[in-house]
Image (spheres, coloured by chain):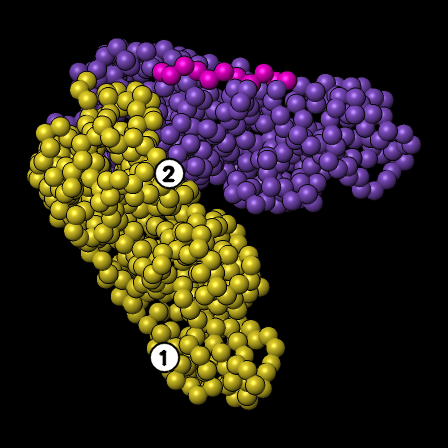
Chain colours: A purple, B yellow
Amino acid sequence: MSELRLGLAGLGNVGAELARLLTRDAGMLSARAGRPVRLVAVSARDRGRDRGVDLSKLAWEENAASLAARADVDAVVETIGGAEGAALDLARAALKAGKPFMTANKTLLAHHGQELAALSREKPGAALYFEAAVAGGIPVIKTLREALAGNRVEEIAGILNGTCNYILTAMRETGGDFAAIVKEAQALGYAETDPSYDLDGHDAADKLSILAALAFGMPLAAGGFGVEGIRAITAQDIGFARELGYRIKLLGMMKRTADGLARRVAPFMIPLNAMLAHVEGVTNAVILRGNVVGPLTLVGAGAGGGPTASAVLSDIIDCACGRRAVSFADSAPAATVPPEKSITSFYMRLMLKDQPGVLADITAVMRDARISIQSIIQHGRSAAAPVPVVFLTHEAPEKAFYDALSAIERLPSVLEKPCVLRILA
Amino acid sequence: MSELRLGLAGLGNVGAELARLLTRDAGMLSARAGRPVRLVAVSARDRGRDRGVDLSKLAWEENAASLAARADVDAVVETIGGAEGAALDLARAALKAGKPFMTANKTLLAHHGQELAALSREKPGAALYFEAAVAGGIPVIKTLREALAGNRVEEIAGILNGTCNYILTAMRETGGDFAAIVKEAQALGYAETDPSYDLDGHDAADKLSILAALAFGMPLAAGGFGVEGIRAITAQDIGFARELGYRIKLLGMMKRTADGLARRVAPFMIPLNAMLAHVEGVTNAVILRGNVVGPLTLVGAGAGGGPTASAVLSDIIDCACGRRAVSFADSAPAATVPPEKSITSFYMRLMLKDQPGVLADITAVMRDARISIQSIIQHGRSAAAPVPVVFLTHEAPEKAFYDALSAIERLPSVLEKPCVLRILA
């Protein structure tokens, strides 16, 4: 069978690893693909840098999009990153040229996936592959699209951001405070210099958008659902979670309910008997619940050069073998649960002035909002410093809870911003 | 695109569920396949039995193999079971007719997979699909063949038998003894009337053989490696495991080592910080470690009508979409580690006559075999009844350990058959 000649754009961590593997393992990859697979052209900013692989015999394009136009490139791999610019130009150029396009770029897909899927449908050769875009080395895309093809997906819950999971794990293991652990994570390369995209939940939200489009036909556009990060979590919350038999994890969650699709990114209290509680450090995990198969859990490396390259290589071999799946479900999108119907149990940690009547004020607000309290925990007392008091609620409508929370925050005895966590049922 | 017309052989638990789903979800499945998928003919022993689905409009074949010959059947699905007889006849007939053959039958593959793969290579249409043959609803075949196509697999470890895992979990949770829990499992339908195939490790061994062929190119023939079951495990061992911070699980294991491929089915002591320790009840789990992606863990339902049907449906949709993978790796098989080079730590529980000098005799045997003892645990004393004493060893060559064990078993103070478990590193 004829050769599959690849053009690769981006030679950062993932791209360089791919170039190395495509060179070193060419024999094995070609055998598995049933045809020769060869890297023929690359594009990156810095031509001179040593990337641990000999690129001297490859064609070099200054402009990434030019890779798509080359007659000697049959398929294009993109590891540049970013929603716009070179990555988007290259994606459009490749698909319009009727060439397969493989990407590790979640942001590109979350923002322009709909357009790229439409381009992919227009030309027979313009297949769109993106296994590496969600959860790195975990084959969640292939599993959703192919292995669960006989299922209606009922629920997806996942630890989709390794940075947050590393920080929460390190806080638990060391007792350290949020800011100190973030610095440590930055030093270790687990957090960016500006860590907002990870810490505020946007990275997990982009990944969840892609999964929502695949599993529930939701339109691929960033936003449209609640996204919270982990900045409010302190060592105190980690301590309360331990005492109560939970671990705190940032989850992306989607679930069909009688009222529609409930969907959010938020930190959750996870009971120790749930497998997700034991997924630690930078590891990612996704639970997919199908109506026929039941729950299926996938756990593995969610980022890093190797794991991400592994996912791209699976796309490359699928492409070489002619294996292809529909880009995104074209079913009617699921309706979204209105916030007043979304039901959850909450953990709320308040910092209170320790004086008579404080608890009476707070519990009165909750009673008026018809939120039932499961337990209240207060350790220690202090006339001088704010005292942490934790409230666990029974299941309550989100809107009622947040209305009550606003009222509680305005009470003069509530001294700092509360920390609110959902409790995984 | 033209219709895919299916013939289904076997209407037991899995077959009947498939017939129901192919009927009820025909619209969804056809949309996902990009072409109509329709069940047109079936074969089963009892035509009259109510299976919760209307089969009256389908063609009926007395002889399963006749399904393959029908002009109106494009692809054949087998859920009869068994290594020989009707299942094997049908498999040969379908592949020789150049028709895709899909099976949930691990025994058939473990015994005749090599022949069926060869038949599959001979005709272009004769694709061989068997996602449901290992670990039920967990897509371990697709993940190995496709998602990890860019990896050299270094290690596979899995809880592959739900019956054994149910029994070990129930022993731990209830404190009950082996025989009583097996009876309970039989009453619940989790164990067969003759449970030997499960309890003695043969079911896990057949599944491991299929994974060994896929990942390491090992010839598909039953046997050729150590297989132990769980019958020797008593409530005492469950208690010692708890005390030592382990859970006992029957594992199928394969690992590349400097001396070749180490491969076995045996009960292991698994430390609580390993995710496999938390896989309970009938749930299955598989860890696949690739050289590029690192460890990837898949957890889900390993048996049952729904989960198994889900896996077959994914094969059917792959088939309808023209997605196909090579049946088994054609790489040179990995060499097997000679037993004298296989290194493990052991748990050994002896039932001893409680008298002076017993420990001296046993430790002398172990010293002479150059097996280093990590700890010895004895609780309680009794002049009348045998006393359990547990030895944990440091890593030792298997052969040396088993030679020592034979010598120890012959000591007059050793009163019952020892229980030996490997310790997962």
Q: Does B202 sit left or right of A352 as displayed?
A: left
Compared to residue B20, the image places residue A128 above or below, namely above
The chain containing the residue under callout 1 comes to B
> Is residue B10 visible in this depiction of the protein?
no
* Mark 2 or mark 1, whichever is nearer to me: 2
Camera-side residue of A414 and B35: B35
Query: x, y (%) of residue A67?
Result: 26, 17
* Mark 1, secondary structure of its residue: helix
Other residues around mark 2 within 10 Å, as few (<14) / some (14–19) / many (≥20): many
Q: Which residues are magenta?
A: A330-340
Disc number placed over residue B406 in the picture, else none: 1
Given the current orientation, which residue lies at the most extreme right position?
A356
What is the quadrant of the N terminus of chain A in the image? top left
Circle 2 sits on which residue?
Answer: B306
| Secondary structure predominantly adopted by residues drawn in magenta | loop
Amino acid type indicated by mark 1? Ser
Q: How many marks?
A: 2
Q: CA distance from mark 2 to mark 1?
A: 46 Å
Disc number placed over residue B190 in the picture, else none: none
The residue that appears at 43% across and 49% down in the rendered structure is: B282
Place residue A311 in its image quadrant. top left
